[in-house]
Amino acid sequence: MLAAADEPVQRPKDAKLLTVDSAGRVRHRLRSDFVDLLQPGDLLIANDAATLPASLAGVHLPTAAPVELRLAGRASLRPSDIHRFSAVVFGNGDWRSRTEDRPLPPLLSPGDQLALGPLSAKVEAILAHPRLIRLTFDASPDAIWAGLARHGRPIQYAHLSAPLAPWDSWTRIANLPAAFEPPSAGFVLDWRLLGALGARGVCFATLTHAAGISSTGDPALDARLPFDEPYVIPAATVAAIERAKEEGGCIIAIGTTVVRALEHAAAGGALCAGEGVATNRIGRDTPLRVADAIPSGVHEVGTSHFELLRAFAPDDIVQAADHALNLLRYRTHEFGDSVFLERFRPPLTELPSRPV
């Protein structure tokens, strides 16, 4: 059985890495060997979003009932576009209770006011579920940013043993505050690894994607994950992708958020730089236009993250990988172990498998 990683350690020395190469071969390695899987000319792309303190404790003013609000979406990543969010709302309690055990919030209606520490917000709409709302903060952008920084906390779940500090959820390359939960596949990165990649002739690029929440505690609402997520892809990253593909390198997307942003931006055929909002859901039947491989966390069957991995390999290979993960009790969740999955190449193709 899989085991939950309960300590906020981004790069534990004993972290495991399960690899699945383009021929479907499954192997176990140490995650510290990750750089050995890459070849000169490959391009590694990471999500450089910093994680917002997106959990806000507060009060539903019409009933005086305590609530916890978890920001879950916004229209763009522009710093001034910070007034309107979608959010998941819980009743009394906090991360120490399992998400699926959290009570519903009081009955919410459009126009209701929420007091969230130094911030005030109004419910604009109920989004077809009693826990999911659209809200507007009543303050200037600077005041909203300051209120989030002073009052907000990282979103976390009951599998963790202690409260998270904000920096626990930031990758080493964190830049624009945009993610609602950490783009945790990027926890594998540190400056030593980036230096080793450069020495090996592996290129590196970034994009920014508002990684969304991973659980709402409600099966019907979880079935709608992932929510729409804004992203920005720099022109330099698109140019690096084009150059790598022309030279025969592999595009290695670190984590599900990078895959989602790239594949959404390339849905029209050509990969486009600039802003966008990922509305796509990637799964078994999704043709991948950009990503050739993905390092990712260990995800449980049935989650949207696991479904995305099915785009890289047939079900029998994904199931064999899941069996291997369970057999050796790989650790799940954001501080857990990792998998490295190459896009499957049928045996009849002339493309040789990369060494793993």
Image (spheres, helix red, strand yellow):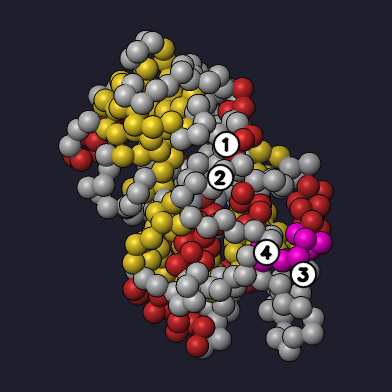
Q: Nearer the viewer, mark 1 or mark 3?
A: 1
Disc 3 residue crowd, few under 14, some 14–19, many 20+, Cα 10 Å: many
Judged from the image, the secondary structure of the residue bearing numbered disc 4 is loop
Give the residue type at disc 2.
Leu
Q: Is residue 329 magenta?
A: no
Mark 4–mark 2 Cα distance, whole angstroms, equals: 17 Å
Mark 1–mark 2 Cα distance, whole angstroms, equals: 7 Å
Q: Nearer the viewer, residue 326 or 217?
A: 217
Cβ–Cβ under 8 Å for marks 1 and 2: yes
Q: Nearer the viewer, residue 109 or 41?
A: 109
Please give left or right for residue 25 compared with residue 267 in the image. right
Q: Earlier in the sequence, mark 3 or mark 4?
A: 3
Judged from the image, the secondary structure of the residue bearing numbered disc 2 is loop
Kindly identify which numbered label has been placed on residue 225. Answer: 2
Kindly identify which numbered label has been placed on residue 24. Answer: 3
Judged from the image, the secondary structure of the residue bearing numbered disc 3 is loop
Give the residue type at disc 3.
Gly
Mark 1–mark 3 Cα distance, whole angstroms, equals: 33 Å
Query: What residue is disc 4 on?
Result: 285
Residue 77 is situated, as x and y percent measured from the top left of the image, at 32, 52
Is residue 89 in view? yes
Mark 1–mark 4 Cα distance, whole angstroms, equals: 22 Å
Q: Earlier in the sequence, mark 2 or mark 3?
A: 3
Mark 2–mark 3 Cα distance, whole angstroms, equals: 28 Å
* Above or below for 31 versus 38: above
Residue range corresponding to the magenta coloring: 311-318
Q: Earlier in the sequence, mark 4 or mark 2?
A: 2
Query: What residue is disc 1 on?
Result: 221
Give the residue type at disc 4.
Asp
Residue 184 is situated, as x and y percent measured from the top left of the image, at 52, 50
Identified at 35% across, 74% down, the residue is: 236
Q: Is residue 313 magenta?
A: yes
